[in-house]
Amino acid sequence: MTMDKKLITGIKDIDEQHESLFLAMDLFEKQTPTKDLLWDILLDIERYSKLHFETEEAYMFKYAYPLLEEHTKEHANFSKTFEELKLGFEESGFSDDFIEKFKTFMMTWLSNHYQHCDVHMANFLREKMF
């Protein structure tokens, strides 16, 4: 899973953070998933998403982004669902079902969130920042 050029926001730290997520997902897809690898990827994504959401939300607040509340809710929904997935992994362990649920969630969320939320946010921020 590589980062599509149309997902580049033009905001350096946001783009670098997006790239980190795509690298984690690319690692997941290219290697045969093992329990330890999947756990490491889950922890990486958890760390990434916390830092990334804080970064985006700080920019949105600083530049008075009109859809800040809606965008922040999207982040909260991701974090809640991701935490549920992670807890499910801790409780139920490694399985093909979990791998499929994780992959489907991540790919669907990334596609929808980036295309419908981040693109709009980035356009607004670029106008204010540059």
Image (cartoon, helix red, strand yellow):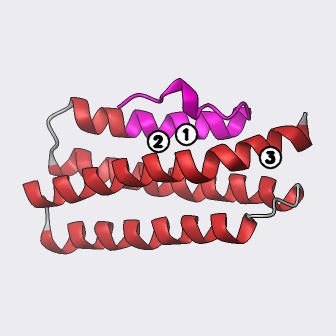
Please name the residue that numbered disc 3 is placed on. Answer: 124
Q: Is the residue marked by circle 2 packed among few (<14), some (14-19), or many (20+) residues within 10 Å?
A: many
Numbered mark located on residue 54 in the image: none
The answer to whether any part of residue 105 appears in the image is: yes
Query: Can you see residue 95?
Result: no
Q: Is residue 80 above or below residue 14?
A: below
Mark closest to the chain's N terminus, 3 or 1:
1
The reply to whether dot 2 and dot 1 touch (C-beta < 8 Å) is: yes
Q: Which residues are magenta?
A: 1-24
State the quadrant of the C terminus. top right
Percent across and percent down for residue 122 are 72, 43
Asked if the residue at tag 1 contacts the one at tag 3, i.e. Cβ–Cβ closer than 8 Å, the answer is no
In this image, 19 relative to 44: left or right? right
Amino acid type assigned to the residue bearing label 3 in the image: Phe
Query: Mark 2 is on which residue type?
Result: Leu
Report the residue at 26% width, 50% height from top: 103
Q: Which residue is mark 1?
A: 18
Q: Secondary structure at mark 3?
A: helix
